[in-house]
Image (cartoon, rainbow, N blue to C red):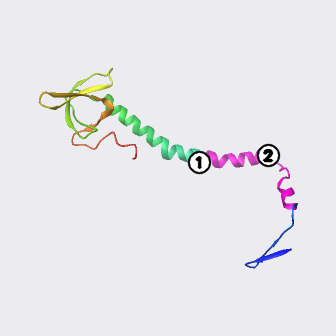
């Protein structure tokens, strides 16, 4: 039985095609290597486009937070401007003076940058 569609003919041959699909292939190692190359290529591209920039950004943020010192004029993640009054390397927080006689304790991760400069710490959407 022949079916004509757009000038092509397709022959309905029953189960012969199914038997041909189940035939074992020669050179199984080559087909395994051929299947692994695209996956390894995708992983390499993912690493260079996603993981490397994230790692560089994280190192930049860590260096910024480690370099904080008393007297630095900073911006806190809520958009508040202040001056660092207490920075201890062994504590996860800093003290920021936001007005006369008004000091708040803020996590180091909450300090996003220096006043007058672009923020070092940005949203994870970037």
The circle on residue 91 is none
**Magenta-highlighted residues:** 16-42
The circle on residue 42 is 1
Q: Outermost residue, top direction?
A: 90
Q: Earlier in the sequence, mark 2 or mark 1?
A: 2
Q: Nearer the viewer, residue 44 or 24?
A: 24
The circle on residue 28 is 2
Q: Main secondary structure of the magenta part?
A: helix
Q: Give me the residue at 29% from left, 42% from top.
A: 119
Residue 34 x %, y %: 71, 49
Q: Give me the residue at 31% from left, 30% from top.
A: 108
Label 2 environment density (alpha carbons within 10 Å; few <14, some 14–19, many ≥20): few
26 drawn magenta: yes
14 drawn magenta: no
The quadrant holding residue 122 is top left
85 to the left or right of 30: left
Label pair 2/1, CB-CB below 8 angstroms: no
Q: Is residue 97 above or below residue 46?
A: above
Q: Give me the residue at 87% from left, 67% from top.
A: 13
Residue 111 x %, y %: 28, 34
Element under label 2?
Answer: helix
Element under label 1?
Answer: helix
Residue 100 x %, y %: 11, 30
Q: Outermost residue, bottom direction?
A: 7
Residue 76 x %, y %: 26, 36
């Amino acid at each position: 039985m022949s079916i004509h569609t757009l000038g092509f003919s397709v022959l309905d041959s029953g189960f012969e095609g199914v038997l041909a699909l189940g035939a074992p292939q020669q050179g199984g190692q080559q087909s395994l290597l051929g299947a692994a190359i695209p996956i390894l290529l995708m992983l390499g591209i993912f690493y260079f486009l996603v993981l490397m920039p994230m790692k560089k950004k994280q190192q930049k943020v860590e260096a910024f937070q480690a370099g904080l010192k008393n007297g630095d004029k900073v911006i806190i993640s809520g958009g508040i401007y202040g001056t660092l009054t207490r920075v201890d390397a062994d504590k996860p927080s800093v003290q920021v003076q936001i007005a006369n006689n008004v000091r708040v304790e803020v996590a180091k991760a909450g300090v996003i940058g220096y006043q007058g400069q672009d923020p070092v710490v940005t949203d994870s959407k970037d």
